[in-house]
Image (tube, grey):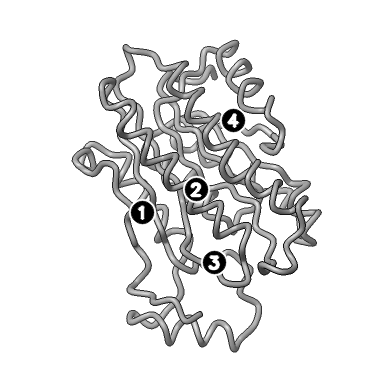
Amino acid sequence: MPMARGAVLITGLSRSESIGYAIAAKMIEGGRDVVAVGFTRYDTRIDREVDEKFSESLHDLAERYGVNFRYFEIDLAQTSSPDALFAELSQREIFITDLILSHCESVDSDILNTTIESFDRHYAVNVRASWLLIRRVVLSRNDELGNVVITSLTSDHTSFNLPYGSTKGALDRVVLAAADEFAHIGLRANVLNPGPVDTGWITDNALREKIMESTPLGRIGLPRDVANIVAFLHSDEGGWINRQLIYSNGGFHNFN
């Protein structure tokens, strides 16, 4: 089935436990066509188990809801990747109206131990690639499809996590700038901080308890919690929310 026009592009899919997967599923269930990108070699590099079934399950879900799903394996550290992706989408007559940035490079290190290579890779993936994707969405915009909506996921974690935290701060500014610079075409852009979300990284029971104690609602955020908010931001009902950094974290307060 050819991809219907006006698709959602979601980055950061490589596992069924990920936030990106939950967002993709939510969008599909809401009747949206979805294009997803991921990079499983990143999971291999950081010793995370590779999920070989996630794409197949989203294809099955899309078929059940009568929409379309496509997945592309892309290394966002390469400057050519966004252009290559959009060239492929254009050839297939797939037009993107919604961009959801849920990808990240995230390797913990502090101020003294962060390497130049790691610092540069974090900025390449988390900031530069996001800027290039936003630019491509705007440049390839189809006037007949309506306004563009962008949401990026962020974090205020910085201590002992220098490259990740600093790039998230830079990403915030890029996304919020888009809401100003492209206001004349009706583009909306927001940043969402979901706090700690259990995507399989919380393996230490003591850390789990600490997060729960720091959250008034007494539990850890789940990918579906993030997906629910993102879906609202990309709906007509969320149309008055623009240029905001939104906290949706159950009241979590940083314990660093």
Q: Which residue is mark 1?
A: 228
Calculate the distance from the C-alpha at mark 4 to the C-alpha at mark 2: 29 Å
Q: Where the N terminus falls, by quadrant?
A: top right
User: Which comes before the other along the chain, label 4 or label 3?
Assistant: 4
Q: Amino acid at mark 3?
A: Thr
- Considering every residue shown, the one lying at the far front of the view is 112
Do the numbered discs 2 and 3 sit on residues whose CB atoms are within 8 Å? no
Calculate the distance from the C-alpha at mark 2 to the C-alpha at mark 3: 12 Å
Q: Which residue is mark 3?
A: 158
* Residue 111, x across and y down, in percent: 66, 67
What residue sits 44% from the left and 39% below the top? 174
Q: Amino acid at mark 1?
A: Asn
**Which circle, 1 or 2, is nearer the viewer?**
2
Judge the density around disc 4: few (<14), some (14-19), many (≥20) Cα neighbours within 10 Å: some
* Residue 233, x across and y down, in percent: 30, 44
Q: Which residue is mark 2?
A: 170
Residue 80 or residue 44, whichever sits in front:
80
Q: Amino acid at mark 4?
A: Arg
